[in-house]
Amino acid sequence: MNEIATLARPYAVAVFKRAKETNSSKKWSKNLSFLAAVLNDNVIFGMIDDPKVGRDRLFTLLLDICADQLDQEGSNLLKLLIENNRLNLIPFILELFETYKAEDEGFINIDVTTAYAFTKESKQHFNEVLEKNFGKKVNMKVVVDSSLIGGVLVRAGDQVIDGSIRGQLQQLAQRL
Amino acid sequence: MQLNPSEISDLIKKKIENFDLSTQVHTEGTVVSVTDGIVRIHGLSQAMQGEMLEFPDHTFGMALNLERDSVGAVILGAYQHISEGDTVRCTGKILEVPVGEALLGRVVDALGNPIDAKGPINCVETSPIEKIAPGVIARQSVDQPVQLGLKSIDSMIPVGRGQRELIIGDRQTGKTAIAVDAIINQKGTGIKCIYVAIGQKRSSVANVVRKLEEHDALAHTIIVVASASESAALQFIAPYTGCTMGEYFRDQGEDALIIYDDLTKQAWAYRQVSLLLRRPPGREAYPGDVFYLHSRLLERASRINAKEVEKLTNGRVTGKTGSLTALPIIETQGGDVSAFVPTNVISITDGQIFLESNLFNSGIRPAVNAGLSVSRVGGAAQTKIIKKLGGGTRLDLAQYRELAAFAQFASDLDESTRKQIERGQRVTELMKQKQYSPMSVAQMGVSLFAANEGFLDNIEVNKVLDFEAALLSYFKSEHTELMDSINATGDFSNEIGSSIRSGIETFVKTHSW
C-alpha cells in the first residue's frame, strides 16, 4: 500500500496542479470519483489485468462507459494510465487529490463517530470546537455507531481523539 | 499472599475511584503487512525513531524505519496474532526496561520480565534502553582493577573498571567459562554483574544459572536472556537492555561488570531484522550501521567521575566514582579474526583476550594466546604485586614462544637457551587453571613469585600444578596474615618479597607434593 501511494503521488500532484491552473478542481474531483466508482465494479476490475483485453479495447470500453461524465482532460488521464498500466492507482489518486485539495482550501477532513446522532445545534457547536482546535476549517463527516456506548471519537488523518465510553472502558480494563 | 474476594473488590473499587477519565489523543496507523516479525504500518505520521508502538493484545513493537508513507517496525515477542488491518498506536515513549537492585539474582527476558518463576520484580524505576554514552567531561580514567580470578589473564591482560575487553575465539574454546569465572570472582567485591545471553540454547543458559547458584554468585548477578528461540528483535535489543541495567549501578556510584555472550549472534539478529526491513545489505550482508550497533553499545561501558555521580543521584551519593566494565564475547569461524564483525569489535574495545582451539585441545586452559592478547588500558589498573610479578611471566612466555621451535633439539642447545625453554614450559604449565576456581590476588602473587624466582625450575613440568596447589594450601594455613594483607592492599615491597621467599623456601624443604 505504501508503494502504491508512492506510485500514485506524481499523478495526484499533476492532476492537482492542472486543476488549479484551469480552476477546475470540482470537475476533476467528479472525474476521479466517477472513474474510481467504475473501477470498483468487479467486471471492470477483472478486465484491467486480463491479457485477452487489449489496451485499446479497454480504453474504448472505459470511454464508452464514462462518455458523458468525463471531459477531454479526464479521458487523457485515463489514456495515460492505461498506457502506463497504472489503472489500479485511481482510488489512491483520488484520495491524495482530495487531501491536497482540502489542504489547499484550508480544510481538514475529519471523521466523527458518535454514539448518538447530533442535533443541528450540537453539530454546529462541535464543528466550532473542532475548528478552534485544529485551526482550520473542518469538513466533518459524521457516522453514528452505538457500539461506542457514549461520547465521540474524532479521527483526523492518523490522529485520533478518543472521547468515547468504549475507549475509556478499554483504558480501565488495561489499568486493572 | 491470599486475598479474599471482598478485599479484591475493594482494591478494584479503589482503582476505579482513582481512575482518571481523560480523553485520549494519539496517533493511529494500520498494519499493511506482517513478515517474520517485521510489520509495515500505514499512517503513524508522528512516530519517532525507536518509539514503542502498541499493537492489539498488549503486544509492543519498535519503530525502526520511518518512510514517506509507512513505518517499518519490529514486534517484540510473539507476532502470530497480528494481522493485516490491525490498528497500531503510538505511545510517545522510547522503549524502557525496569532497573534497580531488585533485579539482582533474577533471570529476565530482553524486556525485563522475570522468567525464573520467582515472582514479580518490584522495580520502582525504568530507564530507556538506548542512551547516549557519558561525555568526555563526565569520565575518569581507568585505574582500578577488576580481578577476573584467572592467573593468565590478571597477570598478563589485566582488565580495569570501566574498560571494554573483548573475549574472542572459536566455538568450544572456553569463552563463556572465562565470563562465568569472572562473575564468580566478583563475589564479595561489591561489583554487580550482568550476564546477557544472546541467541544461546536455553539449556546452556540454565547451566550457567545453575553454576552461578552453586558458587553462590547469583545474588550479585542479573541474567538477561534472549534465547535462540526468541524473535530476532529481542536478540537485537537484549544487550541494550543489559547495558541499561548495568548503567543504573554505574550512575549510583557503584561498579558493575557486564558480559555480552555473544555479540556475533546479536549482529546476526540485527542483520535479519535489517534485511527484512529492506535496508540495503553491505559486506557479509550486514547493514551499513553494524559498526554503530556495537560501538554505541560498548561506548556506554565507562568510568564516570564523582562529580557526575553526584549530579546523577541529585547529591545523594558523593565522593564515589561509578563504572561499568564490559566483556563482550565474539565467536570466530576457524580462527578468522579478520571477518567483518570481529575486526569491528576488536577496533572498538580496549584490548582482547584471544582464545585458540589448538591451545585448548593441547590442554592449556584457559586457552589464552598470550602473544595476540592485549589490554590497552588495564596496565594502569593492576595491583602493585601483580604488576611487578606478572611482567616477568609475560616476558618468559614471549621468549619461550620464540625458542619453542628448537625445543626438540634439547640436547644440542646451549645452557641459557635450554633454561629459557624449560622456564617457558613451566610458566605455560603454571598458567593453566581449573574452571570455577578463581584465585585471589595473594594466591596469584605467590604463584608468580615462585615462577619468577626460579623455584619451579627444579620441578618436573607435569608436577608444576601439584606443587602450586600444595604451596598455596601451605600459605593459606601457615601465612594467613601475610595473604590477608596482600589481598587487602595489593601492595608489594621488598619485605613482602622476602617473607614470601622464606615461606616458599621452608615449604620446599619441609613438604612434598
Image (tube, helix red, strand yellow):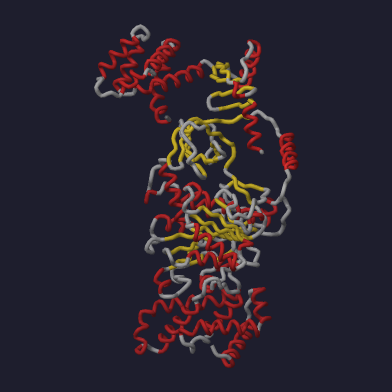
Q: Which residue is located at x 36 percent, y 9 percent?
A: A71
Q: Is residue B498 left or right of residue B197?
A: right
Q: Quadrant of residue A24?
A: top left
Q: Is B309 or B17 nearer to us in this picture?
A: B17
The answer to whether residue B335 is above or below residue A70 is below
Residue B187 seen by the camera: yes
Q: Which residue is located at x 41 percent, y 86 percent?
A: B418
- Give x and y (percent) for residue A129: 64, 18
Q: Which residue is located at x 43 percent, y 66 percent?
A: B172
Q: Quadrant for the C terminus of chain B, please.
A: bottom right
Q: In which quarter of the image is residue B439?
A: bottom right
- Give x and y (percent) for residue B407: 37, 83
Q: Is residue B347 left or right of residue A66?
A: right
Residue B44 seen by the camera: no
- Give x and y (percent) for residue B496: 64, 82
Q: In which quarter of the image is residue A54?
A: top left
Q: Is residue B455 left or right of residue A88?
A: right
In this view, the residue farthest toward the top is A68
Q: In this view, does B147 lie to the left or right of B172?
A: right
- Number of marks drawn: 0
- Give x and y (percent) for residue B217: 61, 65
The answer to whether residue B332 is above or below residue B81 is below
